[in-house]
Amino acid sequence: MTVEEATLSEPAADMWRTAVALRFWSVGADLQAFYDDPAKRALMKPEAIWEVEGGMKLTGPQLAVASAGRSRIYQAFEAAFAKYDFLVLPTAQVFPFDVKERWPTEIAGKPMDSYHRWMEVTLPATMAGLPVLAVPAGFGGALKLPIGLQIIGKRHSDLAVLQVGHAYEKASLWIAANLPSALNG
């Protein structure tokens, strides 16, 4: 087995723009009825209102651009899978954070412009409709909580992704032996 650094041909900034537009369209539409009812809107989190209002501002041409972007993301994965059997990425850009913190507003000195930016590494594989399995990778951050890796496979390779995850689990016995005290209770 060979492990190499890999990149997708679609720029991360373009994938992010595509993801945000498609989220506005999808999540915003799902929450629209709550938003339209003033009593229910008063109970919504600011992040949910942001999704709805973002969706309301989308135009047809913007959705067409996002749809084309989603196709480019899929094609970028296809090109990567011409060389690699699997791609492995972190499940988030940060370790779990305190529940009192709504979402990280900065990571490594870079301001986060939305509540889901801290987990943007999960969005491309989701938009491409690929099988993904999250497995434990270790513990860290201020609270010594777990973080994972996402194993991404080609289209329709669900079983192969599960097999890689199982092999990883068998080879990673240290995880169970090193649970942080917060998870041992």
Image: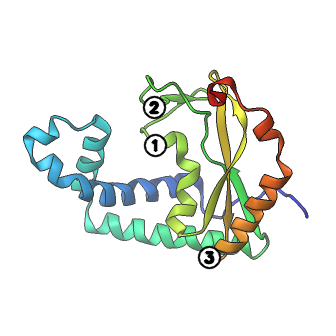
**Residue denoted by label 2:** 103
Task: Give, as a three-letter code, the residue at label 1.
Answer: His
User: Does residue 109 appear to the left or right of 138 in the view shown?
Assistant: left
**Drawn side of residue 96 relative to residue 67, left or right:** right
Q: CA distance from mark 1 to mark 2?
A: 8 Å
In this rendering, position of residue 161 left or right of residue 12: right
Circle 3 residue: 155
Label 1, residues with CA under 10 Å away: few <14, some 14-19, many ≥20: some
Q: Which residue is mark 1?
A: 116
Q: Secondary structure at mark 2?
A: loop
Nearest to N terminus: mark 1 or mark 3: 1
Disc 2 or 3, which lies upstream in sequence? 2
* Residue contact at pointers 1 and 2, CB within 8 angstroms: yes
Which quarter of the rendering shows the C terminus?
Answer: top right
Query: Where in the figure is residue 70, as x and y percent of width and height?
Result: 48, 68
Kindly report the distance in space between the C-alpha atoms of the residues bearing marks 1 and 3: 25 Å
Res 60 quadrant in image: bottom left
Q: Foreground: 101 or 166? A: 166
Residue at point 76% right, 59% down? 6
82 lies above or below 174: below
Query: At 44% from the left edge and 37% from the top edge, which residue is drawn?
Result: 113
Q: Residue at x 49, y 42 (%)?
A: 117
